[in-house]
Amino acid sequence: MRCTGWGPRLSKGDPAPARTLRVFEEAQRSTARTRWNQADVDRAIIRTLTRDPKEAEGPLRPAGATLTALNRHHDGHTPETREARREAILSATPERVRRALLATLDAGCGQAATCIVAGRDQLEHARRELGATGDMTIEDLLAPPGPAASTGGSANGPRAR
């Protein structure tokens, strides 16, 4: 597969791994040709500012306020940097968003990683369908049933006592 973006890309319990891999593959090309309008961007701005905990300014319970303050301190988010981030979000335009997304996808190309959690038969089928034999490694996440079960372990690996 060709590198098409930032990593990691994850799909858990995927019923159609081949389709998912094609979507990942197409992300950069799709972004390059998509033209959003300002209404699209405005909806994204509203969603970002109302759902992002970094932007939350509403009343907080003491435990939440403490955690928020600790996270902001740890991450270096001063009132000035938070205001600059908010202004950057509010001034977003469709072209700036598209350019930023493409730059992010391009910059992460060398580090892109994909993980799809699905049944082995589905993954083997995806490998055949995509012809990705050299670029696709299939690994078991859980230990196969075997000797571990007879020595106090389970099919999922050793068990602590």
Image (spheres, rainbow, N blue to C red):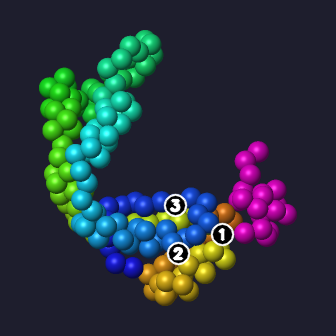
Give the image location of residue 122, x and y in percent: 63, 74
Give the image location of residue 21, x and y in percent: 46, 71
Q: Does residue 73 appear left or right of residue 80 in this picture? A: right
User: Which of the image's four quarters has the N terminus?
Assistant: bottom left
Q: For marks 2 and 1, give the CA distance.
A: 13 Å
- Please tell me whether the stretch drawn in magenta is mainly helix, strand or loop: loop
What are the residue bounds of the magenta stretch?
144-161
8 versus 87 height, above or below: below
Q: Which residue is mark 1?
A: 119
Q: Does residue 28 appear left or right of residue 134 in this picture? A: left
Disc with the residue nearer the chain's start (2 vs 1): 2
Disc with the residue nearer the chain's start (3 vs 2): 3
User: Which of the image's four quarters has the C terminus?
Assistant: top right
161 versus 14 height, above or below: above
Circles 2 and 1, Cβ within 8 Å, touching? The answer is no
Give the image location of residue 69, x and y in percent: 32, 21
Give the image location of residue 147, x and y in percent: 79, 69
Mark 3 closeness class: few <14, some 14–19, many ≥20 residues within 10 Å:
some
Q: For marks 3 and 2, give the CA distance.
A: 11 Å
Figure quadrant of residue 61: top left
Classify mark 1: helix, strand or loop: loop
Disc with the residue nearer the chain's start (1 vs 3): 3
Is residue 16 at all visible to an observer of this figure? yes
Is residue 71 at all visible to an observer of this figure? no
Classify mark 2: helix, strand or loop: helix
Q: Which residue is mark 3?
A: 11
Q: Amino acid at mark 3?
A: Ser
Q: Is residue 122 magenta?
A: no
Q: Residue at x 74, y 52 (%)?
A: 159
Q: For marks 1 and 3, give the CA distance.
A: 12 Å
Q: Amino acid at mark 2?
A: Ala
Mark 1 closeness class: few <14, some 14–19, many ≥20 residues within 10 Å:
some
